[in-house]
Amino acid sequence: MSSRSRSRSAPSAGFIGDIRRLILELSKRTSASHKRFVIFLILVGVALRASLLLRPITYDEAFAYVEFATQPLGKLLSDYRDPANQLLHTLLTKFSTGLFGVGRVQLRLPAFIAGVLVMPLFYIFVRAMFNRYIALMALALVAASGPLVEYSALARGFSMGWLCFVTALVLGRHMIKENNAVSAVAIGVVCALGMWAVPTMAYAALLIYWWMLFSLTAQYKNTVQKRIMTWLLSLVVFVVVTGLLYMPVILEHGFDQLLHHRTVAEQGWYYFKLHHQDRAFDLWAYLVDSSSVWIAVPGLIGMLYPAFISSKFRFLALAALLGAMPLVFVQTIIGPPQVWLYTLFIFHLSTAIAVFYLLKFLQEKLFTKLGKRTRTAAAALVLLRFSLRLVCPWHGNGAVACPKHGRVAYAVRNLKTGDKLFVQHPWDWPVKFSAIELGLSFDMLTGTPAPNAKVLVACSPTDEQSVRSVLLHNAQDPAMEDRMKMVLEPGKLKIFAAP
């Protein structure tokens, strides 16, 4: 474990100086083999995330990009007609696709980078809080965690929220130790950016502030009032910066749009009492389905022992509880599973702590010649292996068939000015994105076809669609169905053409 006496013996050199000293200390106290193992685990995590970047585009990704990221910058930052516009993420996808061109990889690049950066930052936090062995096993779990891998390769803002969350943990430890105002301001700004990326970052931000408050009041007596003032400074910065970032939305839609979005149906306390267990089960089912049961179950059970032996982890676990439950009760809403994935960092940490002490017990009782480095490396590889049962992407995300292998590519080759391609929900937004990706004019997807123009209809019988229903959905004459002939059948989305 990290030594408090060691940290107290070295006076603060200021925020930048402390960061440099931390890097030097970590480098000096880390063997070459340990460094190589850390790099290996991070590279495994990068490879897993990168392997999903070319997966089919999903409805939410396509909708958020086409509806919001294609707008002018000022409109993008104020348009909150739908919560799918996760403002910071949408802004970064606009820059990414503007710089590198429109495509699935370019669209997912900001989320991917955030999902990669969170791994070394989490390792640094766990190592600073506990030790290198727990940090190594926690890194192995995070690198191959199915849900974390999946949402690091989806163009959504959740991985940016995780990055801000873990960054705030690292900064929070520095603020707790040094009472540093720069760290306090940085935490407020980082948490506000997380809220700008995904508003449900509120749960993680509350976790951060509860955890810092618990740590300050428990570790310091003589200077606690002074440190609480620094804590309050950070909280004020968080609230003010969050308000400034969302000011265009507030001016456009009103403050209530942020708290009770009109697209989210009012549920009330009665509905909450009836269905909160179902929502909790949905989260559990998602975690088990997307990772190994050998990781999910010990991770849950392992929360108890670390909370019993470690006050540091106990503060984190209690802060996670207080950061979520009161707000859930006030809102009477339990969000979908992806909202709660930030808690996986706490669960994976608890698993790593429990495994560390289990291995220590086994060494003392049974395998007395087994070295700490050897047992930790072996355990990290085992945890990595069991976590790798991931990923049936995209779990619950409504993926569509890859358009470059048939569907929209066919339309690009066969449509000319005045021709039309008509589709129906839930294929409308993925096809629109693919049309942009493949260079098809957006005008070819809407409006009335020109005289003697070619009309293509894409429909999915598995979604109870027909040529007639697609034509009616697009306000076209259903009698056109009689002239339609199937020209592309394989796959879920069938293509009909006339004349």
Image (cartoon, rainbow, N blue to C red):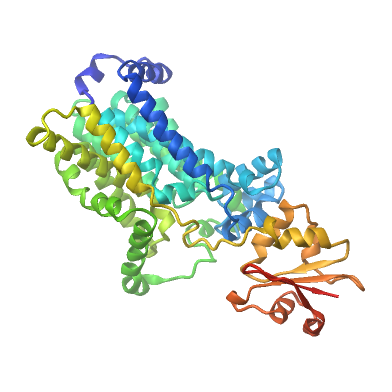
Q: Is residue 192 above or below residue 154?
A: above
For the point 63% across and 51% down, which residue is it? Answer: 78
Q: Is residue 180 left or right of residue 467?
A: left
Q: Is residue 173 above or below residue 432?
A: above
Instruction: Give the total of numbered labels.
Output: 0
For the point 27% across and 52% down, which residue is it? Answer: 294
For the point 62% across and 77% down, which residue is it? Answer: 461
State whether residue 239 appears in this view. Answer: yes
* Residue 105 placement (x, y as % from top left): 61, 45
Q: Quadrant of residue 415?
A: bottom right
* Residue 131 placement (x, y as % from top left): 25, 29
Location of the N terminus by quadrant is top left
Q: Nearer the viewer, residue 295 or 446?
A: 295
Q: Is residue 491 left or right of residue 312?
A: right
Location of the C terminus by quadrant is bottom right
Residue extending furthest toward the left: 365
For the point 72% across and 60% down, which residue is it? Answer: 408
* Residue 29 placement (x, y as % from top left): 30, 18
* Residue 307 placement (x, y as % from top left): 19, 44
Q: Quadrant of residue 406?
A: bottom right
Q: Is residue 172 above or below residue 87?
A: above
Q: Is residue 21 above or below residue 278?
A: above
State whether residue 240 appears in this view. Answer: no
Residue extending furthest toward the right: 451
Q: Is residue 240 left or right of residue 67?
A: left
